[in-house]
Structures are given as structure tokens and as C-alpha cells.
Image (cartoon, grey):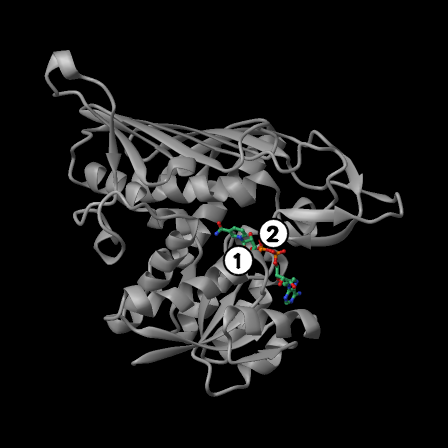
């Protein structure tokens, strides 16, 4: 297959990030399968027509079901809120289309399991959008762990801190409504941390959590895109039905202990997706706000120079780096999506499933749901129980 013909649903925050990735990929990754940006789909005709022109799609549509009838579409890329992931995925797979779906996979574990069953039965490729795996500094952490250079892993300590809804007058966007988003900071930010934990340290066996909704009511929204919104002038308010912050502790199958904190109320922190991993031979620290860097500590350094060193993951030895700029010429958020899409394209070139795929999406959802259950029951929950 020389080109993969894409049909995309959703044209705002993630729609733009994925479109940009498809557009830039051929310039920097000439040897992989290339995407063909065929059709972008959204509900509002004027807005989707504008997005098609701005992002570089050949055509636009307002009904994603019609997208599935077309023979010239190979893959459906889902960038709509979580409440529609399941319906679109299942219909796409039954129509024989490959599926690339944003995270979290679904509103519930049951739904995500059903999605996995259907894509597997249909024999299509499936990918879930955990883009932070594709930061070269995160991939360096993975390499150090896999090569045993950090020794036995004792601690995974992670926090994803944002502050975009600290203001109580910020409107009730879809991310604050359980029936559309599934959960709040937990499924939005915590899902990324859980996926990174699975990727770096392995399976989680048990969890116990706590959560809070600090602001219970908010003005109804008038307009929203991604993390920004404008409230309506009516003065009407609605109930916030998701968590503003969720924290949990975890035990890993290989013996490590984990702590996770996801919040949209960490005043002053915009997108601090961070983890620290401590092993018997060394440690690493990653902070997405300085995403090109990995702090690395090796316990066998000479005593008088022991300390964390700052490794800039932009040398040709680092993942993806040889495709970009000379060492030290850093990359950004959008590059995580380009790398993610490279993995998707490579899966077609090599005829295998991309990673992370729906198995990873389901595994993440299992931990999300186990934490919710532990909060409800105020007790530890075994992951195998959910
Ligand atoms: N990987 C990441 O880091 C990351 C970041 C942000 C969002 N996301 C995920 O991406 C998805 C989309 O989030 P976003 O931030 O792009 O949202 P957004 O609000 O910016 O855009 C959502 C898009 O979906 C469309 N849409 C909404 N309901 C629809 C429906 N019923 N049918 C068809 N289209 C519909 C909207 O018109 C809009 O174009 C969510 O699942 C979210 O969790 C992932």
C-alpha cells in the first residue's frame, strides 16, 4: 500500500493536531506509507468547510455515516468526544475501515471491551491516541528501563497538573459532563499517566483512589474548542458531573509502587505531565513542559560527581531524532502526534497492529474504572476484579 486514505471525524483541538501530523509526515518521513487527507467530517457545514480548507483536506462532510459508505476511505480517525467513540468505531470496523481513535477509548470499560472485540473480529488495524509515549525523552526512559540500566524499579510517581478551570466562571464545557466525557481529570489526564505507567513499568495489579469536584456548578457554555470556551450571557448554570482532581496509589505486577495525581486545579501549572521513576541502579525524571529533556541519575557514577544530569533527547541516537533537526534544535507537542502517525503508517508498511492499540486502551480503561470503584467503595481494588 503506497498511500493510506484517511477520513477524519472532528476538526477542533485533536482534529487539528492529527491533520497537522498527516500533513507534515511525508516531508520528514519519506520512506513510510503516506497518508492521503481525503475527507474531514463535522456537524456544522460552515465550520467543517473552513477546517477542510485550512488543514488541507480534499473534501468535507457533515455526516460521518456517509463517510463509511465510501470505497476510497481506508481508515477512520476519530477526534470527537468520548461519547461517540464507540458508535463510530464499531460502524467503521463493520464497514471494513481501520480505526485510529483518540483516548480515552470509551465512556466505560464495558464499551471499550466491546470496541476491541469488534475491531479484532473485523480484522482491521486499531490504534488509540496516547501521544505522550512518542516524546523521544519518554522513549529514552523506556530504553533505559528495558536495558536494565535503572535496575529493579521501585517507584513510579506521576502527576499531570493543569489549571484551565480554576476560575469558577469558566463554563460547563463537554469535558465537565460525565455523559459526554466519561470522567474529568481522571479519564482525560490520568489516562495518559496510566498509559505511560503501563508502557514504562508494566501491569498494575491493585489501586486505591480519592477524587474531588471543587466547583459543583458552572455557567452554561456558548462556544468551546479544546481547552478554551466562552460562557453564555444567560446567567444559567449547570452541574459539573465529573472529578476536578483524582489521585490514586497503585501496586505494579513487578513489585513497584505507584502514585498518580491528575488535576485541573494546580494553579500555575499549564500542562505538567511528569513522572519520576526510581530503580536500584538509577532514576529518571520527565516533565512534558520541558519535553526534550530527560533527567537521568546513575547510582554508579563516581561519588564526587553524582547527581541528576540533563539529557537533551535530540541526538541521532534518540528515537525519531534523526528525522528532525541537528542536535539541540528541539521539537514540540505537535511532533508527538507526527511520531504517533508514523507508527500508524509503519504498521501498514510492516502489516502488523500499531502500538498503542485498543488492547492498551482497554487496559487503561480497566485501571480508570478500578480507581472509580475503589473511590466508591473506599477500599483497594484488584485490577483483575473489574
Ligand atoms: N491525546 C491527547 O493528548 C488529547 C488531547 C485532547 C483531547 N483528546 C481527546 O480527543 C477527543 C476530542 O477532543 P478535542 O479536545 O479535540 O475536542 P474539541 O471539543 O476541541 O473537538 C471535538 C470535535 O468533535 C466534534 N463532535 C462533537 N460531537 C460530535 C458528534 N456527535 N459527531 C461528530 N462530531 C462531533 C466537534 O464538532 C469538534 O469538531 C476526546 O476524546 C479527547 O479526550 C486527546
Give percent across and percent down for residue 179: 69, 52
Give percent across and percent down for residue 359: 39, 56
In depth, the one of 8 and 280 nearer the eye is 8
Cα separation, mark 2 vs mark 1, equals 8 Å
Q: Which residue, given by chain and number where applicable, does mark 2 sit on?
A: 226
Q: SS for tag 1?
A: helix
Give percent across and percent down for residue 310: 26, 30
Residue at screen point 53% across, 29% down: 247
Q: Which residue, given by chain and number where applicable, does mark 1 sit on?
A: 14
Is the CB of the residue bearing disc 2 within 8 angstroms of ligand 1?
yes
Q: Quadrant of residue 205?
A: top left
Disc 1 crowd, CA 10 A, few/some/many (<14, 14-19, 20+) = many
Is 8 positioned to the left or the right of 200 in the image? Answer: right
Disc 2 crowd, CA 10 A, few/some/many (<14, 14-19, 20+) = few
Cβ–Cβ under 8 Å for marks 2 and 1: yes
Q: Quadrant of residue 65?
A: bottom right
Is the CB of the residue bearing disc 1 within 8 angstroms of ligand 1?
yes
Residue at screen point 62% across, 49% down: 182
Is 324 positioned to the left or the right of 291 in the image? Answer: left
Residue at screen point 53% across, 31% down: 269
Earlier in the chain: of badge 2 and badge 1, it is 1
Amino acid at each position: 500500500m503506497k498511500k493510506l486514505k484517511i477520513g477524519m471525524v472532528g476538526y477542533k483541538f485533536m482534529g487539528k493536531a492529527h491533520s497537522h501530523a498527516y500533513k507534515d509526515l511525508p516531508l520528514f518521513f519519506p520512506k513510510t506509507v503516506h497518508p492521503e487527507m481525503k475527507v474531514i467530517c463535522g456537524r456544522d457545514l460552515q465550520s467543517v468547510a473552513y477546517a477542510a480548507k485550512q488543514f488541507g483536506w480534499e473534501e468535507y462532510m457533515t455526516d460521518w455515516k456517509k463517510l463509511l459508505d465510501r470505497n476510497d476511505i481506508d481508515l477512520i480517525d476519530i477526534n470527537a468526544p468520548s461519547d461517540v467513540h464507540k458508535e463510530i468505531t464499531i460502524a467503521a470496523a463493520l464497514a471494513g475501515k481501520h480505526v485510529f481513535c483518540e483516548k480515552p477509548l470509551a465512556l466505560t470499560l464495558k464499551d471499550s471491551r466491546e470496541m476491541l472485540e469488534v475491531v479484532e473480529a473485523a480484522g482491521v488495524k486499531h490504534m488509540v491516541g496516547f501521544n505522550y509515549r512518542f516524546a523521544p525523552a519518554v522513549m529514552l526512559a523506556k530504553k533505559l528501563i528495558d536495558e536494565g540500566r535503572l535496575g529493579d524499579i521501585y517507584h513510579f510517581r506521576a502527576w499531570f497538573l493543569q489549571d484551565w478551570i480554576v476560575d469558577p466562571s469558566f463554563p460547563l464545557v463537554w469535558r465537565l459532563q460525565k455523559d459526554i466525557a466519561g470522567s474529568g481529570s481522571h479519564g482525560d489526564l490520568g489516562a495518559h499517566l496510566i498509559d505511560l505507567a503501563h508502557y514504562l513499568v508494566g501491569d498494575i495489579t491493585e489501586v486505591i483512589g480519592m477524587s474531588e469536584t471543587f466547583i459543583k456548578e458552572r455557567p452554561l457554555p456558548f462556544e468551546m474548542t479544546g481547552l478554551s470556551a466562552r460562557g453564555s450571557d444567560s446567567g444559567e448554570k449547570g452541574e459539573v458531573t465529573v472529578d476536578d482532581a483524582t489521585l490514586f496509589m497503585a501496586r505494579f505486577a513487578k513489585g513497584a509502587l505507584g502514585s498518580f495525581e491528575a488535576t485541573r486545579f494546580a494553579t500555575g501549572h499549564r500542562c505538567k505531565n511528569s513522572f519520576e521513576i526510581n530503580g536500584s541502579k538509577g532514576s529518571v525524571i520527565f516533565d512534558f513542559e520541558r519535553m526534550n529533556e530527560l533527567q537521568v541519575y546513575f547510582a554508579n557514577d563516581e561519588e564526587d560527581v553524582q547527581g541528576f544530569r540533563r539529557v537533551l533527547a535530540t541526538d541521532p541516537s534518540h528515537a525519531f531524532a534523526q528525522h528532525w533537526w541537528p542536535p539541540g534544535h528541539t521539537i514540540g507537542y505537535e511532533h508527538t502526534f507526527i511520531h504517533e502517525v508514523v507508527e500508524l503508517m509503519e504498521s501498514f508498511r510492516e502489516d502488523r497492529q500499531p502500538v498503542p492499540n485498543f488492547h492498551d486502551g482497554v487496559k487503561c480503561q480497566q485501571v480508570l474504572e478500578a480507581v472509580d470503584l475503589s473511590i466508591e467503595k473506599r477500599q483497594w481494588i484488584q485490577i483483575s476484579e473489574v
